[in-house]
Image (spheres, rainbow, N blue to C red):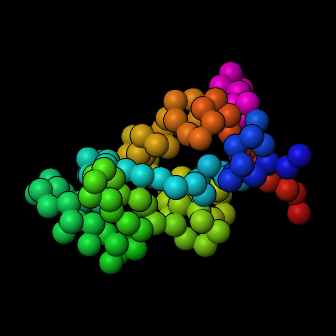
């Protein structure tokens, strides 16, 4: 059975003890929905402290800039925008690596797959095919 990011029952067990586990993966996890808080937007250098006071104004600006897809006032969460193939806008198309410094990444990314995700402990790992 092939791995499908939209069907977690196809995912494989994450190997935390294998440092090469993510090495040649095509980063399907970076094509999943990422929700962030306003504090994480600040950490990602996408806003500044004073702008955090009015989340709706912040959301409107980030949506207009194409960084955020939507804002849910009920939860206070912002959904990051995606580019072609549903890839995260911070995923480098060639290297399939995140362009954000590790300490600037949102907790949804840092905690995946061991603490967070549709199937905790499992990952939609798929190796790059050699051409």
The residue shown at (79%, 53%) is 128
Q: Position of residue 93 (x, y in %)?
A: 63, 65
Q: Left or right: 85 with respect to 131?
A: left
**Residue 18 quadrant:** top right
Q: Left or right: 46 with respect to 122?
A: left
Chief secondary structure of the magenta portion: loop
Q: Left or right: 5 with respect to 39?
A: right
The residue shown at (65%, 68%) is 85
**Residue 120 quadrant:** top right
Q: Residue furthest top?
A: 17
Q: Left or right: 70 with respect to 5?
A: left
Is residue 103 a member of the stretch shown in magenta? no
The residue shown at (42%, 52%) is 35
- On the question of residue 46 being in view, the answer is yes
Relative vertical location of residue 116 with respect to residue 84 in this rendering, above or below: above
**Residue 114 quadrant:** top right
Q: Residue furthest front?
A: 74
Residue nearest the viewer, comparing 105 with 10: 10
Query: In the rendered view of the protein, which quadrant contains the C terminus?
Result: bottom right
- On the question of residue 45 being in view, the answer is no
Relative vertical location of residue 65 with respect to residue 86 in this rendering, above or below: below
Is residue 21 a member of the stretch shown in magenta? yes
Q: Position of residue 68 (x, y in %)?
A: 38, 66
Q: Position of residue 100 (x, y in %)?
A: 45, 52
Residue nearest the viewer, comparing 71 with 108: 71
Q: Which residues are magenta?
A: 13-23
């Amino acid at each position: 059975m092939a791995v499908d990011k939209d069907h977690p029952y196809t995912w494989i067990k994450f190997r935390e003890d294998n440092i090469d586990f993510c090495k040649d993966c095509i980063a399907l996890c970076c094509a999943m929905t990422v929700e962030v808080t306003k504090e994480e937007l600040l950490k990602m250098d996408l806003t500044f402290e004073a702008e955090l006071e009015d989340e709706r104004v912040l959301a409107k600006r980030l949506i207009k800039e194409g960084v955020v897809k939507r804002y849910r006032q009920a939860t206070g969460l912002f959904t990051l925008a995606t580019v072609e193939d549903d890839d995260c806008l911070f995923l480098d198309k060639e290297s399939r690596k995140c362009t954000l410094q590790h300490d600037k990444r949102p907790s949804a990314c840092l905690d995946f797959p061991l603490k967070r995700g549709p199937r905790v402990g499992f990952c939609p790992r798929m190796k790059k095919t050699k051409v």
